[in-house]
Amino acid sequence: MSEKKYIDIEFSQLDSERMRLFMGPQHPSTHGVLQLEVELDGEIVTDLIPHIGYLHRCFEKHAENMTYPQIIPYIDRLDYISSMNNELPYVMGLEKMLDIQVSEKVEYIRVIFSELNRIANHQIAIATFGLDSGAFTPFLYYFRDREMILTIFEKASGGRLLYNYFWVGGLAADVHPTFKEDITEAIRIIRDTNAEILNLLLKNKIFIDRTANVGILPADIAISYGVTGPILRASGIPLDLRKAEPYSIYERFDFDIPVGNGEVGTVGDCWDRNIVRFREMEESCKIIEQALKTFPSQGDVRENVPKRIRLPKGEIYCKAENPKGELGFYIISDGKDKPERVKVRAPSFVNLSALPEMSRGYMFADLVMILGSVDIVLGEVDR
Amino acid sequence: MEEANFVFNMIGENWIAFAIISLLPMIFLLAYALIAILGELKISAFIQERLGPMRTGPWGIIQPVAEVVKLLQKEDITPDSANKPLFNLAPFIMFAASYAGFAVIPFSSYFVPSGINLGLFFLLAVGSLGIIGLLMGGWASNNKYSLLGGLRAVAQIVSYEIPAAMVILTIAVMAGSLDLQEIIRQQSGWFWNWFVFGGSGGWIKIIFLPFSFIMCIIYIIASLAETNRTPFDIPEGESELVAGYHTEYSGMKFAMFFFAEYANMFIVSAIITIIFFGGWNSPFGDFMGGPIWGVFWFVSKAFVFVFLQIWLRWTLPRLRVDQLMYVSWKVLLPFSFVCFLALSLLVMLK
């Protein structure tokens, strides 16, 4: 009689061969030239390393060799989806250093255009997220509407994507005479489309199945990674610089901060991040409507623009709530007309750092959704 | 039963007749592919509030021809590290499998390329042959995305064969035959004789109406999965797998995959038409009946389902691979068993 053999197999220790997949930089859904080194166990993502730098344009070094107003066009190119918002913290910081008080009208136009650009940014974020999930049609609906916002910007600044519109001490040009009517019409259409997208995409059963409980980012991890913007708010923390540290004239307007509450899944999942963006569009519409009511139509927008900008010696950190999160510029001046150092705190870069934390343990198809829900722009990540 | 093939009646059973019979579906398929590609372009444009192609010909109607010419001109690339025989063979196997399905599709009461009496079973058999082409293409490309796409395609199609087979089994029970012509003949008369409305018979079938409806919907969902169309286009889901199993294919070999996909779309639409919607029968009794009108009715009914597939593609997001399996094994399969039992009961009562 042979001895009875017991064969114990611990299935969790049966390690299958892991596959290393380099996703990008030429991949349809890395939202630009991002490379993700993904380690897959079957279809499960076990590890992930984002490799960045394919779009590095030496912005910070470049800025040291240019005068302060010359930097503004380069700032447009950081997050090229929301150029207006990018310019705002930079010019606000310089105005504070130079002690320039801009006129009421300039402040109103800045707020209105920033909010319009926020809507345009969130439209692209939700549209491309829909594209990642396989829904092609909402993408084109949103791009159709975004054209109207771009036309409004074009009428004011001449540019459709990169504006160079907010100048230190004022604006590049006054708004178009039909500015108010254009915006009222645009908001009406934006709301119509949003109602449609809510039914077509965000409340779609398949879409909810794909996004609910996927890519959960708990609030404590979000804070420890320094994540800001809609992603942080989707994790349930109502931090919005427009309310927390009001700049420009934001404290005059009445608006809410949408936070993720896990309606269809868990707080901080992909669906929450999208619904937060979706609701922020409505809040932006509310701000614009309030601003249009009290809009001062008289005044010159270039009266306070200084002829030559020479900053006093010193340093400043100026920040604003960009559509993607907190965008900050840390400017060191040595008293010349060129900055000694400019450092950008780019929200996309910081938010991207939380991606491995969000995507470990989910499937490869979910990784695409999680990356889409972070809403990065590689121009800002790499600078 | 008279000879159900007009070509044999006209020129007798010789090799010319066989050649004509095997080429006729190809001619139809080419014409259909052009119409379907244009339909895809124009319907998606309509859904997305675009114009679609407008430059090639009036309203862009010869755009599909231009696309075919473009694909013919493209360089035919075979990757260095690919397994060349398998890589080159895969698209043709895929297409041959879809074309084989046309052998038993009855276009009219007087034309079916091959009148074998196992038509329904034959369709099921050759329908799963195309999987081999997918897997070959995905594996031979030596690309990780292609491999993932090929594996997913096989897992998906094999899973969805089962609910589809349950539906076909039910139809076989209801019709008592596997011969497609016989199945269609049993649904003749007005449209309430179609199997989607429980087939011909007394008023008792009204009780079983929900079951036959559910059967029809199960088959439509399963067929979407078998043709890899949205919401089940996971094997080629471009957001994660670039283009799935045909990532490395270009030029004419890509066109063959593309062509096979469109042929498959027609095959499943034809099967839905045959087993649920009366095939070449007119919906209104003898109104516009007969073999010539039969072709019209058959093709128009099938095109409705081709349109349905295009419509869904441009409306719905994509499922994830595990959710797809969930739908197949935990939703469609139990429902199809229940409906199978219920409809078998109906056959007993009739």
Image: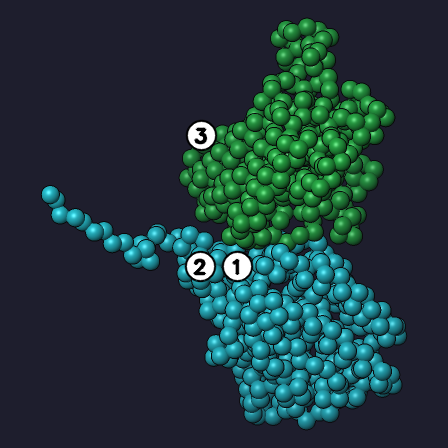
Chain colours: A cyan, B green
Compute the Cα span from label 3 to label 1: 34 Å
Task: Classify B248 as above or below B182.
Answer: below
* Residue B234, x across and y down, in percent: 56, 48
What is the chain identity of the residue bearing mark 1? A
Residue drawn 57% across and 56% down?
Answer: A29
Q: Which disc is residue B72 wearing?
A: none
For marks 1 and 2 on the same chain, the one whose residue lies earlier in the sequence: 2
Q: Which residue is mark 2?
A: A45
Compute the Cα span from label 3 to label 2: 33 Å
Please name the amino acid that badge 1 sits on: Asp
Q: Have a look at marks 3 and 2 and say if they share a chain.
A: no
Q: Which residue is mark 3?
A: B85
Of all residues shown, which one is farthest toward the front?
Answer: B349
Of all residues shown, which one is farthest toward the left?
Answer: A1
Q: Which disc is residue A366 wearing?
A: 1
Compute the Cα span from label 1 to label 2: 9 Å
Residue drawn 72% across and 23% down?
Answer: B185
Task: Classify B130 as above or below A168.
Answer: above
Q: Quadrant of residue B182?
A: top right
* Residue A157, x across and y down, in percent: 77, 72
Q: Residues within 10 Å of mark 1 (few under 14, many from 20)?
A: many
Residue drawn 45% across and 47% down?
Answer: B144
Please name the amino acid that badge 2 sits on: Val
